[in-house]
Amino acid sequence: MGAQNATGMKSASDVNDPSILMSGLRIENLRLPHGVMVERTDGPCGTIVRGIDLADDLTSDVISLILTLFHHSGVLVIPGQSRLTPQRQMELTEWFGRPYNRDSEGKLDDIPTVDGTRVQNVSGGSELAPHSDVQDYAIPPDVTVLHGLEVPPPSAGGCTLFANLFQAYDELDDAMKRQVERMKWKPASTLATAYGVRMPQAIAYVAKHGMGALESDVTHPVVRTHPVSGRKALWVSTFTVKLVGIDDPEENKRLTHFLKKHVTQTHLWYTHNWTQHDVIMWDNRCVNHWRKNWDHKYSRIMHRSQAGGSRPF
């Protein structure tokens, strides 16, 4: 494990050490199967794995390595997966748990699926501000897997950014950590997000049911503990509407704004410039992601699958 200072935070040298993963696990302590290469990204989270073709019938030690890296990296990048089919993508997603199901009134989450699988076609769209997936549900998915079938050239935009929420928590001062340790927050609903990006179904639903339909009754912990590494993440995002337990509206607004701004600091983010047939697996329990807009004369075809699901604590 990486060295810890007196407050339990990783030291600056650990954060910048290319052999230490997001959780503190060292790459050299891993047993790598023959031909598999592992390296950290150039950002504060994420690992790149080479020498694996996910379409193959992989051995148990390769699958175990993928799971270990996922739980300790926040983001796992596996390039060159041109043979990956939707059926196989769903199989590998199930290594992380049962397929994640969304059940939304009005079917605003009813994204088209591919070839009779639970893999979703999430092509198109525009910029989507920093968030962790499905935070308006009491039990969000643990893992999201995204396969880039067609991607714009880097000069056209369309990159995805990932933020290290462990580091965001570590960088709070001790007084702020004590203040938010047991605090909860309320998210915007999926409907609100769809309404914000002007999805026609959402506009029609709000016109029929009123703006109150945009509210969510779900609450989540501000500080989320990762069930595998035990590390604490500052688990707030663009979806965070307000904090629970702060009655003064101005103080609630001030602290909510501070926390949301804190997790969007530039140094917390890894920027991934997609290449065709990259597969990215990210851990919704400890990273936010941010989809940037792109020149829409270029196609961006993405296949998404999700699995697991655990109540944040």
Image (spheres, rainbow, N blue to C red):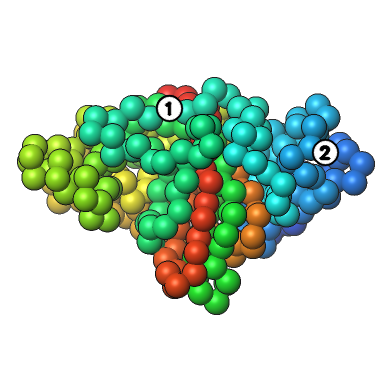
Q: Nearer the viewer, mark 1 or mark 2?
A: 1
Question: Residue at 75% of width from left, 49% of height from top?
Answer: 49
Residue picked out by circle 1? 101
Could you say which quadrant of the image residue 85 lies in?
top right
Q: CA distance from mark 1 to mark 2?
A: 33 Å
Question: In the image, residue 266 lies at what x, y percent?
Answer: 49, 65
Determine contact: label 1, label 2, CB under 8 Å: no
Q: Which amino acid does the dot numbered 1 rest on?
A: Asn
Quick check: 115 left or right of 11?
Answer: left
User: Could you tell me which secondary element the residue under label 1 belongs to?
Assistant: loop
Question: In the image, residue 130 lies at what x, y percent?
Answer: 40, 54
Question: In the image, residue 31 lies at what x, y percent?
Answer: 86, 36
Label 1: few (<14), some or many (≥20) within 10 Å? Answer: some
Residue picked out by circle 2? 30
- Earlier sequence position, callout 1 versus callout 2: 2
Question: Residue at 79% of width from left, 37% of height from top?
Answer: 56
Of the 4 image quadrants, the one containing the C terminus is: top left
